[in-house]
Amino acid sequence: MTVEDKNQVLKDQAIEIFKAGLRAVDPKAAIKSYCGLNDSGILTIGDREYDLNSYKRLLVIGAGKAGAPMAAAFEEICGDRIEGGLINVKYDHLDDLSRVKIVEAGHPVPDENGQKGSESIMEIAAQAQEDDLIICLISGGGSALLPMPAEGLTLADKQDSIKTLLSCGATIHEINAIRKHTSAVKGGRLALTAHPATTVSLILSDVVGDDLDVIASGPTVPDPSSFAYCMEVIEKYKIMDKLPPAAADYIQRGAKGDIPETPKSDDPIFQKTQNLVIGCNMEAVLAAKAEAEKLGFTTVVLSSMIEGETSEVAKVHGAIAKEIVKTGFPAKPPVCIISGGETTVTITGNGLGGRNQHFAIEAAIDIAGLDNVAILCAGTDGTDGPTDAAGAVVDGMTLENAQQAGISAKAYAADNDAYHFFDKVGGLIKTGPTNTNVMDLRLVLVGSE
Amino acid sequence: MTVEDKNQVLKDQAIEIFKAGLRAVDPKAAIKSYCGLNDSGILTIGDREYDLNSYKRLLVIGAGKAGAPMAAAFEEICGDRIEGGLINVKYDHLDDLSRVKIVEAGHPVPDENGQKGSESIMEIAAQAQEDDLIICLISGGGSALLPMPAEGLTLADKQDSIKTLLSCGATIHEINAIRKHTSAVKGGRLALTAHPATTVSLILSDVVGDDLDVIASGPTVPDPSSFAYCMEVIEKYKIMDKLPPAAADYIQRGAKGDIPETPKSDDPIFQKTQNLVIGCNMEAVLAAKAEAEKLGFTTVVLSSMIEGETSEVAKVHGAIAKEIVKTGFPAKPPVCIISGGETTVTITGNGLGGRNQHFAIEAAIDIAGLDNVAILCAGTDGTDGPTDAAGAVVDGMTLENAQQAGISAKAYAADNDAYHFFDKVGGLIKTGPTNTNVMDLRLVLVGSE
């Protein structure tokens, strides 16, 4: 085989491995792999069993971009045992549902539709009785798609509070505490409202590390933060005067004990709450690992929690590729390095692209000249940045091929124009929208000699 | 054991592992492990043998910061079989030598002493005969410490040429081509001058990837670049008018064929030339690996070629630590991840530190709160940036300990003041200058539960 042929085989294998990762985190597949109903009416969810005969009503609520296919899969399992329910999803993120209502709402900026849907969802939770079973479907975008400000606050008050925190340089941890403590639904308040019903949240995680209280701001999860902590944050950044008065007042009243705290981990309501991650980056990583091994590769899972500036993270992956080729570390070829998570791009240009395509163009620069190496980077949602590609795949000849066509990878990278680079030299991966999001997958493949 | 105790054990082990890496690349140890002389006068160098009885003279030349200890070790092996020689070293980088002369010279900015020393070295090479054996000792800093402009050029012409290239954004590859093609010694010209003598270069690599033609600009190594390529570079950046006239003229004459090219890989002179890397980052990595395994750790060698912005590379290492703790990937604890290479720091503050201490403070932020994790980053030269520390070691409590002392890791990191951070909270690693430099070592240790 020529170098070109070998590289092409590797790139094809990389795409196969990526797609195996995608299949594992398909919302419908995820629901079906964690939930099952037998003929006796026993609903199995993860390692727990719920005897539907002992519940009066089975209700479905939730929010997130993958809500519709998740609900569709759950309807396939439980059919007309589902009494009803309502989910908030992003506009046009639909599926055919017969029992559960869909509200289309704003994302990433919450809107009135979202708030109305949230009020209906909270109404369902509030009216639920001790013998009701509520299934709560949570996925990426769930925080923006479940907007319900605390009493006395408007949606604008809540959004302005977050803007103030962002502008003063608060950490994501600090922002989340304020977000939960200006909300009627987040930080476990949905579970509190649903009590004494039994609540089971099925969660597709789009968050690095899969912290339950962070995904969609944890509507059914104990909240480790408090009003007192929110006051510390406000004092630390001296922003009491900069917050919307209603928000500042609400948090101050909370810190004085005039408003009930978000529920904590020792709250007995959580004895009737199950939170189960049914899809996350690591599941995609492990499915990719299994597929790579099926194709004969030794695998090394680097981490599912990779963050950082895309070009620099690409350099590390490139360095690993070079080392494998030179010395067979960390593993001898054929080897497939797998990493997940989500990187960021500091925009310097005006081009079209996304973090995954940017990673791929930077990786192409790093591995230029290496034979028998392919690197793929793609998002599991199928839409990388504002493009119709999920990501791209490159090899050691990508740079040279581009040069021969008079196209400079470095210039396109500097202009953040990876989409047009790959559109010209080839390498774009187009899956179409996948209706899921467990962040990104990166694959470094080195073939044997 | 308490968490503190466990962390302390891990940090102590990290330092032990780092020191094992250091020992493997000590200049004297490296010379002694690759060279040996038996009673019959057979000098073994790597896998080759040189019968000193068949050579008239054994001469030692070379340049680099580790030159003096390398020469001292070689003198210990060959003693008065050495006829003489001369090496250029950095000011104060001395050792006791009895046969080989030392010239102290400027680094990183070359000076007149360096040029005079280089002329003497070239004189030794020029006068060497077919039955002479020349040992050439090359180490970090060898390029600046072996300055000898091509005929008709001054040292200032050469330096101004490099400045012009740097300011127009030329790649290191392009700069090296010009550097070699304005030099009388680099790009294999030293080997050419020494011909028909036999030349053996013993090389301590301070370059990512250990490319022989890059280390000290490859004085005894075939040159893949050419005058024609230099002209391409000059035209690409349109800098003919910006180069010193003597340099521009020299390269133009070279491209016309009026000046002999640097020797290429098919040049027969290289049949009498051996280039042997006796110390490099991977050797330190492998020694660290062996020590970590002796201490009971499973090891994963990430790459010896890690480059990139320090804070972002630290994030990747932090993500791997988090994954090990959470899922046991890429390997189950106790595990030691080892990486080498050299990162860069984009300076944003006015503090004191170096890339290794900056890595450590960023890593401390990334792994905050994790039990049983330690991360070490240190330079093999023992002097990280303009400090008396080689680097630093941190654990999951470093951030909290600092906070309790009223010290903000983020503020010190933003001010590039890692040295003072660690001076206050502990963690600096001080080895003193090691007289070697094979770049940096990074260790991520995760203990078992």
Image (cartoon, coloured by chain):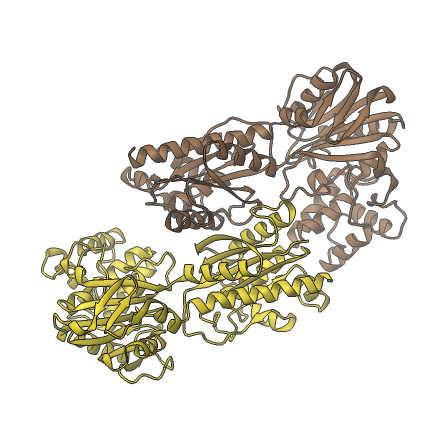
Chain colours: A brown, B yellow
Query: At x 75% / y 48%, what residue is drawn?
Result: A177
With A82 as the anchor, is A439 left or right in this view? Answer: left
Give B132 or A301, whichever is nearer the viewer. Answer: B132
Please say if A252 is above or below A77.
Answer: below
Displayed quadrant of residue B3: bottom right
Please say if A196 is above or below A317.
Answer: above
With B54 as the anchor, is B44 left or right in this view? Answer: right
Please state, as top left, top right, bottom left or bottom right, where the C terminus of chain A lies in the image. top left
The outermost residue toward the front is B40
Displayed quadrant of residue A92: top right
Q: Position of residue A417 (x, y in %)?
A: 42, 40
Q: In this rendering, does residue B262 appear at all?
A: no
Query: At x 21% / y 53%, what residue is drawn?
Result: B229
Q: Position of residue B41 (x, y in %)?
A: 23, 74
Query: At x 51% / y 26%, what residue is drawn?
Result: A432
Task: Count the marks.
Answer: 0
Q: Position of residue B182 (x, y in %)?
A: 21, 65
